[in-house]
Image: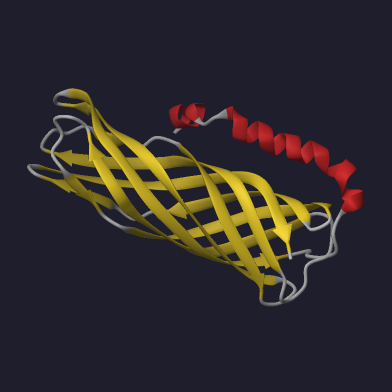
Amino acid sequence: MFRTLRRFPAALMATALMVLCMLPGLSQAASSGIQQGDWLLRLKVAGLVPTHETSSTTPLGGHLDTPSTILPTLDVSYFLTDHWAVEMSGGTFSSDYRLRDSLLGDLEVGRIKSGSVSLVAQYHFRPDTAIRPWLGIGINHTWPISIDPEEGVPDFEASRLTSPLIDAGLDYPLWGPWFASASMRYVMLPTQRFEGDGFSARSRLNVLVMSAGLGLHF
């Protein structure tokens, strides 16, 4: 966990801090509050940090190491009422998997490119004020798009995952319809299975997603 967090790029955290420092000076140009029927479009940079990872592999033993990942995300929200919104988000990302402490030592397994979509119900506590926090609960679905094994590693398949998630964040108006946005999401993944010729692996982990960016209110 701590080794993974150290690999998490400081640029994302620095961007979020810079946005927060800008907020007081920009609040005078804030747009009007959010109402039923409004839409929000957000473009953010997100960091995916695996937590509480456990795994097993057969027959080589050892454990899988899932790296942190940076990816752009796009989400859109529609307000069913002044406080309740439905958000849909998605993106693609690539992960380079490694096998640690196996009978053959540490091995590069390969790269998996995946797609991910989420559907979240959000409650916005103060949609008509400068700082607009929300809490949400939803579901995420992830599937492999392509799998590129390292040289010497046989072809393998990875399972699809459907996971519950919890979500928290805030928006802050900047000027006109534009606003800053930051959020934190915790995704509780089920066991993922990797199956290849002569080997198999199981991995269980959760993912912390931290993101910051800009949005458009219309």
Residue 51 or residue 128, whichever sits in front: 128
Residue at 39 percent across and 53 percent down: it is 115
The picture quadrant where one finds residue 11 is top right
In the picture as drawn, the residue positioned furthest to the top comes out as 105
The image shows residue 5, relative to residue 214, as above or below, that is above
The picture quadrant where one finds residue 13 is top right
Residue 209 or residue 188, whichever sits in front: 209
Residue at 66 percent across and 53 percent down: it is 169
In the picture as drawn, the residue positioned furthest to the right comes out as 28
Residue 160 or residue 191, whichever sits in front: 160
Residue at 68 percent across and 60 percent down: it is 134
Quarter holding the N terminus is top left
The answer to whether 1 appears left or right of 217 in the picture is left
Where residue 63 sits in the image (x, y, percent)?
25, 34
Where residue 160 sits in the image (x, y, percent)?
30, 57
Where residue 164 sits in the image (x, y, percent)?
45, 61
The answer to whether 161 appears left or right of 90 in the picture is left
Residue at 75 percent across and 39 percent down: it is 19
Quarter holding the C terminus is bottom right
Rendering colour mode: secondary structure
Where residue 178 sits in the image (x, y, percent)?
77, 54
In the picture as drawn, the residue positioned furthest to the left comes out as 198
The image shows residue 10, relative to residue 121, as above or below, that is above
The mark tally for this picture is 0
